[in-house]
Image (spheres, rainbow, N blue to C red):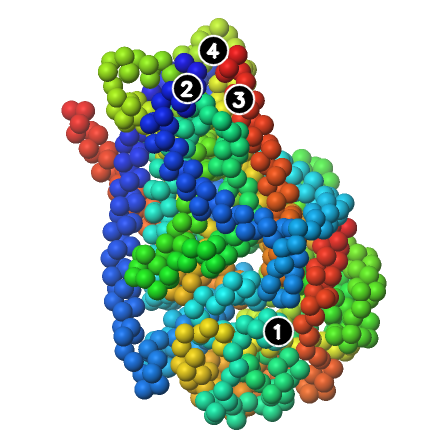
Amino acid sequence: MALFSRSPIAPLEYSRTLWMRLWVGAVMLFLYAPLIVLMIFSFNDSKRNVVWRGFTLKYYDKALNNDALIEALVNSLTIAALATIFSLILGAVAAVMLWRFRFPFKGAVDGTISLPIIVPEICMGVAFLMFFAKGLHWPTDLVWPLNLGAITIAHITFCFPFVTMVVRSRLASFNREQEEAAKDLGAGEWQMFRDVLIPHMRPALVAGALLSFTLSLDDFVITYFTSGPETITFPVKVYSMLRFSVTPEVNAASTILIILTVALTAIALKLQGVKAIAETH
Amino acid sequence: MDLKDMLGQSRGRRSLLQALGVAAVGISFGSLAACGKGEGKKLANGEEARLNFYNWDTYIGETTLDDFKTATGVDVTMDLFDSNDTLFAKFKAGNPGYDVIVPSNDFVERMIRADMLQPLDHAQIPNIKNIDPSFMNVDYDPGRKFSMPYTWLVLGIGYRKSKVKAKPDSWKVLFDSDEYKDRIAWLSEAGDMYRLYGKYLGKSVNALTPADIETISAMMIKQKPYVKKFHEDDGQDLLMKGDCDVVLEYNGDIAQVMTEDDDLDFVIPKEGSQFNSDTLAIPKGAPHPKNAHAFINYILDAEVDKKITETILFPTPNAAAKALMPDSYKNNPVIYPPADVLARCEYAKFNEKLQPLYEEAFTKVRAA
Amino acid sequence: MAEQDWKANKRVFAAVSLPTLLWTLVFFVVPMAIVWFYSFGQNAGLNEIHVSGTLDNYKRATEWLYLGIFGKSFAVAALVTLICLIVGFPVAMAITFASEKWRPWLLLGIMLPFWTNLLVRTYALMILLGQQGYANKGLGALWGGASWVKTLVGLQPLPTWEPVPLLFNNFAVVFGLVYVHLPFMVLPLYAALDRLDRSLIEASLDLGAGHFRTILRIVVPLAAPGIVAGVMITLIPALGAYLTPDLMGGTDSQMIANVIERQFKKANDWPFGSALSFILIYAMFILIALQSMRRKAPEAS
């Protein structure tokens, strides 16, 4: 019983496991059915992915030889990685501030930090358009990846509040006496932050990183308004195809991306697993 | 507590990111090298050998940009926009560095009025002679001072032959009848919808008044229960998938799916319809205006435009290029509808006053 | 230990507050201020906006037409959030109680679909749900099976199967939004549940409470902060969704974000779009600030 093997099994636990497994299985089916359709249609011998017309590999060939598409993918992944790292730092620090301190105008500060979540994308897109055009001009003809600066800044701004929210809800369960105890034992502020708080926040940090990465990777509107020549991203590429409907080429590229992600993760986890076993013995 | 596996997990994530980062750096060296090529090199016209082209996706020949580079040495970077609206919104803050853009006719008018376009120097575009004369003097840009026609389209009804009783050659089928209940799709573009309703009522697309908008809104609300969807210009997909049987679409879009599905056809209703045309234009503040002129001239070349047309399959206003195309294209009544039908179609003028009214009225129709 | 006063430890407070506050100020408050000023302006020509301090945009934005759309969007977003909570809670629990080996896989399993472009996924979902799509074919096969079983036991067969409209209506919008926002609910729940004291659950089970009651009485209250975070993170972006209603909705499925988007793009009426946006923003700001105050109160007492 993979899902429950760690907790001691109560008499009723087994049926509950089965029920849970069915539930998780159904949710996974719900999440993956469209992906499977997408993968199947990447082999579809038709310009549009609406009706099945026979098997072909030509769109893989096209996607792999489409430099613009690959460049857009690389840009997207780079921006997402950078935005995730900075959002984690900013978001976690803000969460600690809101959790630990009492200060004037706290409600307003809290509200303002959470606001980027609610501002409609298009409104924020226009705000950044005006900001970067009239205020801080970010040249887009710099060498890669510096030319992605404006987009990355925008992405960090709408990603970090998500991290703050998740980390804060996690910190709510922190036992502040632990902090006291650490201090009594002579730990400095930094040491306490590193050795006590960060380990406690870790699941929330992982969740926050996953959220930021996802949000950044998928953003179109804000990216569109902050991009200039030569800073095309994958979503901008895909959305501009809307007028001609999404082609199997994009499906093929997405399929490659999915397989690549799964493979890389599998390798990372495998290596991790080997190391963990080596450490325990 | 499972700190340890959380640790493991976060390390897993980090290694994933690292791996992706390494891949990204690897690929980017390639693209960096590619980017560096055009820089520094000066052309005879005094401009660096670069050009920033802002286009719709899949709206150029497969080798056009490479061929242009071979011919002139100019490196073209093509970026993509998804709609005229976003193009216009983006240029409101100033030109972010593009040399050639592809706006549609009403947006040419809008951008001229907003002082966003640069006048074209016809002396630098000798291939202007290839343009069909009927496209030279158009209302939205008299004398072609700011834009060169690239493609044109016309709105009509795409339908599934086996599912209709008779050829749906009147807007009545879409706008004023429950015959195809739940099998109808409209465009989500408010302006187009009101103008075509105007056509159905026997008015010019450019002669609508606020009172007409009221009347039309009432008709739309009455018809709405029979309409399945306001589509985002993907009506051809709705037809192909069998979600709808009569849809409002552009001729080029339907012509493309007709090559895959024999049961589909397209008709321009007898009341007449609305033209659209995509054009090549140079925005104010373009960093390489001479290259831009050279590029536009290159695209208007008969052989070049023939190759583009073969890929994108839209009607071309380039008479010389059309002459080079095979008969199956030239004589396709969907791509080139008969002249008497086209005589009943008009270009929509941009109307600053009416546009917000269309939008608000259509929002009301949707909410009703 | 309650919250510390900021004066008690100024150095640490500066270290944790300055980076985010500065970032928010420069890269969020300043850009948004530009748009905020626009909401008090009007179009002067095609690309000039004259900020005259007029309140007309707000007056228009609070007309019944738009208030109705606000109300409907809120109802849809709330329904989506509720469904996500019901669907996502057991999943978050399953991840929390999974073995070390399985947990990262389950977490990634939830997230992986979301690394595929939203538009690409939405189109795939539309292929599934269409009139002749696989979902309808599957349902049709089930119906046929049921009919066959009925004839087998000697009853009248069911009438022939008519494909149900799964796409281009409000059902499709809710379905699509749940699909898009599910991980936004699962992740915060997981982050909160992970901290749960397992002995409490065991104690509850030992004392004879059923699993359902244990979850409702013990797990849910303990996970409350995570639930609140999950609800906020799901509800708020769902309120701002525009692509799903546009592509999957029917003729009456517009949400407020669609209207706002059209103001900025098609109608070229930025002042009005800004006013609509800011009404949404004010409402949320008040909600969050209130929640923050409410949270402070019990801790102080």
CA gap between label 3 and label 4 equals 31 Å
Circle 2: residue type: Gln
Q: Nearer the viewer, residue B310 or C290?
A: C290
In front: label 2 or label 3: 2
Residue A161 circle label:
none
Q: Are marks 4 and 1 in contact (CB under 8 Å)?
A: no
Q: Measured along the vertical axis of the image, is residue C29 above or below residue A151?
A: above
Q: Are the residues under badges 4 and 1 in a single subunit?
A: no
Read off the residue under disc 2: C4
- For the question of whether residue B248 can be seen, the reply is yes
Q: Are marks 3 and 4 in contact (CB under 8 Å)?
A: no
Chain label for disc 3: C
Q: Where is residue B188 in the image (x, y as percent from the top left)?
A: 66, 61
Element under disc 4: helix
Read off the residue under disc 4: C205
Chain label for disc 2: C
Residue B113 circle label:
1
